[in-house]
Structures are given as C-alpha cells and as structure tokens.
C-alpha cells in the first residue's frame, strides 16, 4: 500500500464535492506537470501539479487524472507509466498500473499510452469538457484535435474548494510553518556583520532539508539596499555592519507551503531610524492580522495596514500631505511609493495559492474559516531611487514582516507565531549562536 498524504476518504470527499458541482455528462482532465531540463540531460527537481496532488496525492511524472460523470456514474481514472525495469534502473522505481490501483484513491489505473484512445471513446459520451490547460502542451493539443466543443476551466470549482483547508491540511501547514519559524530563528542566531547572504540562505535550507522539507520558493536574503528589491534572489552579497537583512523564506511539507518574512539588524542592534521604520511596519502588521476576521472583506487587512503605514509616514515626516492624500481614494495614495505590494495572499499547495485575493481587478474573496492567508506589509527606502525623494536617514532600509494566518470562527490564528518579531526578542536572538 502506498502512503498517500491524506486518508483516501479525504480525497474521496474532494471528488464528491467536485462531482456534485459538475454538470451531467462531464469529463475533467488534470495533467501532471512536465519535467523541465536544467542543462543537457539533467533536470530541475520535479514538483507535481498542485491540483493533481489535491485530488489524488499522486506525484509521479507522465501521468493524468480524469474524472468522468456520465449519467450519474462517476469514475476516477489515473493514467500512469507502466513498470519498466530498464527505466527503473536509471530513474528509480515506478509505481505502475497495479500499484496505482491498489494504493491511490482512484477507481481505475490505465497505461498513459492508452490516454488518446480512452479519451476519444469518452468524448462520445460527454457534453462538457473541463481541462486544466497550459500544464502539458501535448495533452492540450491531443484534446484540441479530438474535441470540437467548448473547453471549460475546472479551476472554477477546484479553486474555491482548495481555498478552505481541512483539519488535516491545517495540521500539515502548521508543521511547515513551525519548521520555517525554527529556520528563521537559526538564521537570526548566526547573523553577524559581513555574513554572506548565501550563508543565511544555506542555514535555512539546511534546516528545511533536515526536516524533510524543501523551499516553497527561492529564499530572499537581502542585506541593506537589497532588502528593498521585492523579488531579490541572487543572495550573493555580504551584509555590512549596521545593515538590516530581510529574509523571506518558507518551506513545503507534502506540498503545503509556509511563507515567512523577518527583518533584523545583522549586528543585533537596531539603529534609531531602523527602529522607527521597523516599529511602524510591525504596528501595521499587527493591525492587519487583527482585521483577519471571518466575514471581513479581502481588502480589510490591506486597508488596516495601509492606514497605519500612511499615518506613520506622516508622523515620521516622510510624507508631507494629509492623511487623505497619503491613503488615496482606493488605497492608491502617496504611501504606495514606499509600500508597493499587497498585504497578503492565499497560502496552500501553492505559495501564492489559488482562490483570488491578489492585487488587481476583482474585490477578492470574503475571509472565511479555514482560509490561510499571509499578512506581510513592508516599507522600502531604496537609496538608488531617483524617481522619488528618499529621506536620507531612512536610505537603504527595507523592512517586511510576514506571518501565516488561519481564519477561524473566533478570529485570526497565527500559525507562525513561533517566530519572534518584537525588537527586544530579535535583538536578544541575533548573534546568540556565535
Ligand atoms: Mn508571501
């Protein structure tokens, strides 16, 4: 028997929930990701498709899950690689047809080579087709060749389902949160002037690997001005005495992500200007977390953070305008010069998880029990910016503080509260392992 991440009954409940929403005579196709070449004949580490993992726990490459609902008869089929000794000698053991059928929450396992013929048979019986597009181009073109009708997006149903985490999912996300908290504390404890950004990255990845987890995204370790680059990733500079370092790093357990940012002075002591900015971001973050109440609009946490930031920037003399101008009509005022990203996003199988809520167009989902979101306001004063005025004393300061928050009936529950964020706590931990 295989070890699926969740009990089979949990996957079966997910199938049931999806099937109930599908129109009669439907077929849903979920292809797995395609392994990507890194260089010549070596590949990037393979990561299975999140929807496929969500619906079956299956991870092996070269596979496709289909769900058919034909006159109230439903069938979950997994198309997989058959066993092959020669290939297994080189690439590792293959689960195969029998293994898949016996160990995974599916009804049928079929060789992947039969996909096209099985598909053309099913097409005679269905009237609604749902395909997870742009994952495997070969599958997209097979489907396009065989099917003349409309192709719908299964994410319409699946994203809503993935947004609300089950108790078992929450448990996993609590473990990946806890491991990431420990990694941040370790990184703080080894920090000292002139440490390399890569050394901090290495200490975190070491902790992730030792706990059988992997990065949930490329860690950001930015010292000084590098902290003001939102997606800085080279992690290739020394961090000088008196500089802050911003570390945005999280891990993944059985596919489920954590996502934490902490910012600390590399020498263990905040300077006065660093302290002023840090305290403002922390106050904004705490206020945004308090706004994570069930029934609140998605915007409410961003509004809470933006209000604190706007007022604070005026008090510090960074913004010389009214609070109204600082905030702007649609939270698009002067404060955006220094806080240019959203306050949070959904978190789950994807680090920027499905279910909406990111910046742009739509109003975003209403916060509901079982959702897990990040809360991560920041302030950035890049010394190299010439398009805006950067106050001299804050020049080269970038601060972001990010926690992972479960919405519960009784309010926000911070899954990453094991990671210290007050100035006193941080100053006592930085350098303590040296
Ligand atoms: Mn994040």
Image: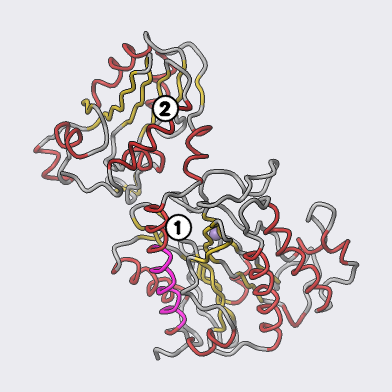
Label 2 within 8 A of ligand 1 by Cβ? no
Per the model, the C-alpha gap separating discs 2 and 1 is 32 Å
Residue found 47% across the figure and 43% down from its top:
162
* Horizontal arrangement in the rendering, residue 25 relative to residue 372 (left or right): left
Mark 2 = which residue? 19
Residue found 34% across the figure and 71% down from its top:
207
Residue 293 position within the rendered picture, expressed as x and y whole percent measured from the top left = 63, 58
Q: Determine crowd level at label 2: few under 14, some 14-19, many 20+ residues with C-alpha closer than 10 A.
A: many
Residue found 72% across the figure and 63% down from its top:
304
* Image height of 322 relative to 333, above or below: below
Mark 1 = which residue? 217
Location of the C terminus by quadrant is bottom left
> In the image, is residue 357 part of the stretch drawn in magenta?
no
Q: What is the span of residues highlighted in magenta in the rendered image?
A: 176-188
* Horizontal arrangement in the rendering, residue 374 relative to residue 24 (left or right): right
Label 2 secondary element: helix
Residue 85 position within the rendered picture, expressed as x and y whole percent measured from the top left = 9, 38
Residue 216 position within the rendered picture, expressed as x and y whole percent measured from the top left = 42, 57
Residue 116 image-quadrant placement? top left
> In the image, is residue 182 part of the stretch drawn in magenta?
yes
N-term-proximal mark, 2 vs 1: 2
């Amino acid at each position: 028997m295989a070890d699926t991440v969740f009990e089979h009954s949990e996957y079966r409940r997910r199938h049931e929930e999806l099937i109930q929403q599908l129109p009669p005579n439907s077929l849903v196709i979920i292809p797995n990701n395609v392994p990507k070449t890194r260089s010549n004949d070596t590949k990037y580490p393979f990561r299975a498709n999140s929807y496929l993992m969500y619906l079956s726990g299956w991870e092996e490459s070269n596979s496709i899950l289909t769900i058919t609902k034909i006159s109230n008869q439903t069938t979950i089929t997994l198309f997989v690689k058959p066993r092959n000794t020669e290939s297994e000698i080189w690439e590792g053991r293959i689960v195969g047809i029998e293994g898949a059928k016996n160990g995974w929450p599916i009804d049928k396992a079929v060789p992947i080579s039969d996909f096209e013929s099985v598909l053309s048979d099913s097409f005679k019986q269905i009237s609604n087709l749902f395909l997870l597009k742009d994952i495997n181009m070969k599958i997209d073109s097979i489907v396009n060749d065989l099917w003349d009708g409309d192709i719908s997006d299964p994410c319409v149903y699946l994203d809503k389902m993935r947004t609300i985490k089950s108790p078992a999912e929450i448990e996993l996300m609590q473990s990946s949160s806890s491991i990431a908290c420990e990694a941040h504390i370790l990184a703080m404890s080894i920090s000292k002037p002139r440490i390399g950004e890569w050394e901090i990255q290495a200490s975190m990845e070491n902790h992730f690997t030792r706990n059988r987890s992997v990065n949930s995204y490329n860690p950001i370790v930015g010292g000084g001005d590098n902290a003001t680059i939102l997606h800085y990733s080279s992690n290739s500079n020394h961090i000088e005495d008196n500089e802050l370092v911003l570390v945005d790093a999280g891990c993944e357990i059985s596919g489920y992500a954590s996502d934490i940012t902490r910012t600390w002075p590399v020498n263990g002591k905040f300077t006065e200007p660093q302290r002023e900015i840090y305290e403002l971001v922390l106050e904004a973050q705490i206020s945004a977390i308090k706004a994570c109440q069930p029934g609140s609009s998605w915007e409410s946490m961003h509004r809470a953070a933006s209000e604190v930031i706007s007022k604070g920037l005026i008090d510090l003399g960074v913004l010389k305008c009214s609070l109204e101008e600082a905030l702007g009509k649609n939270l698009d005022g002067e404060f955006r010069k220094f806080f240019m990203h959203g306050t949070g996003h959904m978190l789950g199988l994807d680090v920027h998880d499905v279910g909406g809520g990111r910046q742009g167009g739509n109003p975003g989902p209403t916060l509901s029990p079982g959702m897990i979101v990040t809360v991560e306001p920041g302030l950035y004063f890049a010394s190299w910016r010439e398009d805006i005025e950067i106050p001299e004393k804050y020049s080269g300061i970038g601060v972001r503080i990010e926690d992972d928050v479960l919405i519960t009936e009784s309010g926000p529950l911070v899954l990453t509260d094991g990671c210290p964020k007050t100035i006193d706590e941080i100053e006592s931990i930085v350098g303590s392992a040296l």
